[in-house]
Image (cartoon, rainbow, N blue to C red):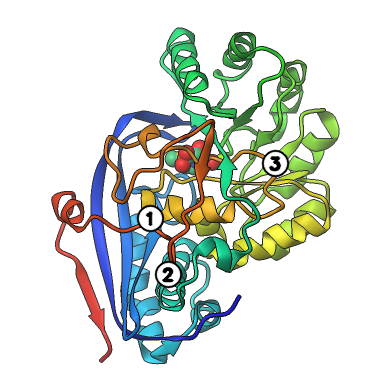
Amino acid sequence: MSALPVTLEAVELHRIGMPLVRPFETSFGRQTAREVLLVRVRTAEGEGWGECVAMTDPFYSHEYVDGCEAVITSYLAPALLAARTLRADDVAGLLRFVVGHRMAKAALETAVLDAQTRAAGLSFGEFFGAVRPEVDCGVSVGISPSIDELLEEVAGYRDAGYRRIKLKIKPGWDLEPVAAVRELLGPAALLQVDANTAYTEADIDHLRGLDPFGLLLIEQPFVEEDIRTHVRLARAIDTPVCLDESITGVDVAIDAIERDATSIVNIKPGRVGGYLEAIRIHDACLERDVPVWCGGMLETGVGRAANVALAALPGFTLPGDTSASDRYFAEDLTESFVLVDGRLAVPAGPGSGVTVREELLGDWALRTPVVLSVS
Ligand code: SMG
Ligand code: MG
């Protein structure tokens, strides 16, 4: 579905801090708050918002909030402001002169897409090609201080209706918690694990110990650049291997699939440079019968709205890390996303379909917004 270009007048960068309802621990660290960089574009046709998914520290990937803000301020926003009249489709090409920095680029592309689709009266769901009004949701469960606390947390999410549980694992926190959660949930529950690159080739035998638990998949056990060891693991275990960090674009996705390094793909729009590239990955996977699911980066309602629309595409056949707002936040920056029967509704209004609550933007501001305008 097409939409007319917008005329860009200014790019605003907002930095907010939101406390998490409970700490979230992964193999690379523990966080108690979410620092978020939000981009607002002001155009002649109206405004649009994009959320940068980078974390405070460069531990999930090389990108991080300060770095994203710097590259947007010095390079990316000036290039878009110089182009002046543009569509979301033009953004990746206009920003190609900067190597990498996909999360920063994705935030800008999404803001332009939001402005453009709002002006056209099209929802993200319509623009992306959504085929369902609501999506099945999973939840990502952090590393816990004890198995008992883990079981209590998982039972809470089960009772809330989540359709799939993902456990964060690392060496020393893998077989035992997985066994305990499988026992708690029973054999039919959808259960998967995510290692965030914490293992090495020497752990392949150990990871085979996950096979008896009937997991949906194991996500990214080895470092981002190491496709080869994922191929070796996939040959050695029955549990399907799913790449997250490694998949930075559609060509890498196709390569990893053809090499049998991944039989399921986690699609995170921020990690791949935006929703348009995310859709290309979805299409390539659908063509190859590779199931995909939508990853999460502890997004506010701004990013969550877009993720839910993406997850409504036909190839998203597994529940995503598209949890309800209250999984992370006591209060969301937009309308709350509320789980109903384990699902979230795809917003139907124009653009992302959600509205930023500007008073909260002020309350949670970590500093004054940066405004970049046409020179
Ligand atoms: O948004 O529910 C969410 C987060 C899901 O586990 C999640 N994300 O590797 O998939 C992943 C992680 C990356 C962020 S960890 C701080
Ligand atoms: Mg992951």
Inter-mark Cα distance, 2 to 3: 30 Å
Question: x and y percent of residue 183 in the render?
Answer: 63, 8
Q: Residues within 10 Å of mark 3 (few under 14, many from 20)?
A: many
Specify which label sits upstream in the sequence, 1 or 2.
2
Can residue 151 be seen from the camera position used here? yes
Question: At numbered mark 3, what does the secondary structure look like: helix, strand or loop?
Answer: strand
Question: x and y percent of residue 294 in the render?
Answer: 59, 47
Depicted 174 relative to depicted 302: above or below: above
Report which quarter residue 96 is drawn in: bottom right
Specify which label sits upstream in the sequence, 1 or 3.
3
| Residue at image mark 1 | 302
What residue do we see at 61% from left, 44% from top? 223
Depicted 158 relative to depicted 348: above or below: above
| Residue at image mark 2 | 114
Foreground residue, 177 or 59? Answer: 177
| Residue at image mark 3 | 242
Can residue 252 be seen from the camera position used here? no
